[in-house]
Image (cartoon, rainbow, N blue to C red):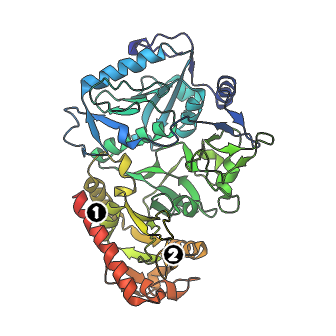
Amino acid sequence: MVDLSNLGIQHSNVHVNLSSDALIQLTLETDKSSVLSDTGALIVYSGEKTGRSPKDKRIVLEESSKDNINWGDVNQPIDPASFNQAKQQAIAFFNTCAELFIVDGYAVWDKKNTIKVRIICTKAYHALFMYNMLIRPTEQELANFGTPDYVLYNAGATKADTSIKGISSNTSIQLSFEQKEILIFGTEYAGEMKKAIFSLLNYLMPLKQMLSMHCSANESASGALSLFFGLSGTGKTTLSADPNRNLIGDDEHIWSENGISNIEGGCYAKAIDLEPQKEPQIFQAIKKGTILENVVYDPATKKVDYTNKSITENTRAAYPIEFIPNAKIPCVGGHPNHIIFLTCDAFGVLPPISKLNAEQAQYHFISGYTAKVAGTEMGVTEPVATFSSCFGAAFMVLKSTVYAKLLAEKIMQHNTSVWLINTGWIGGGYGVGKRIDLKYTRAIIDAIHENVFDNVAFHTEPYFNLSIPETCVNVPSAILNPIDAWSEKEAYEQQAAKLKTLFDNNIIKIQ
């Protein structure tokens, strides 16, 4: 048993560190909307909120941390008195609930940097989610777990009190680095817990000269390691899930003096349009123990329709990383040989592959660029540039330059090669050109891993000064230099100048 009385929680029905099977059974008994899929995965629904609420995140304004935090739209302040009021609201809510759940686990596989996390929540499915996503202690480790380093209070089933100063909506996520606590109100979307802990580590790690990163990681049989950065739709999950390489992690890592370490014990994969041919490892991981969030299924067969977006496009599967057959346990590796920035450029300007120097690596890391296709109105489409610093601005607590400087230092120290890969359009922007064939992108990634470009000549394009290889095995040379693939060279030049201006304006805004 765990005594919560020191927190003010007086409850006689607390489930502490239950097994996956027990949490599944309790979910099915207490949540009538939950059901087992035809593969045994637990289907659940998060209610009104089917994604994160980044505008509702607050960080407590504390003397010990206030000068470090990059205050603004992403990191909004709330005063300590308001945090304490909200915490009392969470405790009072817990004391009225029929049952509570506690999940104890670790974040960061690297033993030198592991932190102990305790989750207090009111739903069995939330407990199962964090059981999957945290690093699971052994029975002996649980017995000796002791006092956690950080506690997360998930009171998401009750609305935040907007009469409290600094709380502007019914949803509120609050982090106190001094009290080492996290509060969640007004959202039952499970991913909010995962990203709150990531935000916590994005504060703690850089202060110890360790780079926290929103990226995936895999390595070869010989231990050659690659990191993949990229926003949604760029191919990060697809390209890092390589059956010929071992998966270290799919989303969150730190780079310390010891090398790369996954932060999490599980994966939280997008499930929309999931196909066994394209994502066989993820598809096969959806089995007993996996949570399927906000998917649509056939009531008769319990078969999931992964193409159905009627609830949300943000359907998800959460499962222990061990469910991936080629996962490397423990999820750690050496220093990366390659860093790959993925972008889906719908303007058709960026080359399918270019090599970056240390200065360019910082520039593109701070930019965190991709482009999305806007909705069609009267037959007109126009790409929309999207910038997210460090490829994860919503989770970064310090200034982006802090993370970028650490990245550059580590690249130089460990002689890491950095590449910019465009998985978007070539020969014209969206509606004119065509999207780069996945088989060519895979061939490029393979060539990087096989160090093919060590013996290839490069040339420099004039807009971003990107270094482009003249040839690549199994890739047509005609698509390697973007301007060559455009029939209208002047149109390419106009589009390239436009995109460069968008980049420059974004950098000015960040600085």
Front in this rendered view, residue 5 or 219: 5
Residue furthest right as drawn:
300
Name the residue located 57 percent from the left edge and 72 percent from the top edge: 442
Task: Check residue 506 in the rendering and tell me which mark sits there, or answer none.
Answer: 1
Q: If the image is split into quadrants, where does the C terminus sit? A: bottom left
251 shown above or below 10: below
Marks 2,1: beta carbons within 8 A? no
The amino acid at mark 1 is Asn
Name the residue located 44 percent from the left edge and 83 percent from the top edge: 482
**Res 451 visible:** no
Image coords of residue 438 (percent x, y): 59, 72
Residue furthest front as drawn:
378
147 shown above or below 359: above
The amino acid at mark 2 is Gly
In the displayed structure image, the side of residue 310 where residue 461 appears, left or right: left
Label 2 environment density (alpha carbons within 10 Å; few <14, some 14–19, many ≥20):
some
Q: Label 1's element?
A: helix
In the displayed structure image, the side of residue 108 where residue 269 appears, left or right: right
Which residue is the site of mark 2? 431
Name the residue located 38 percent from the left edge and 19 percent from the top edge: 89
Q: How far apart are marks 2 and 1 (CA)?
A: 25 Å
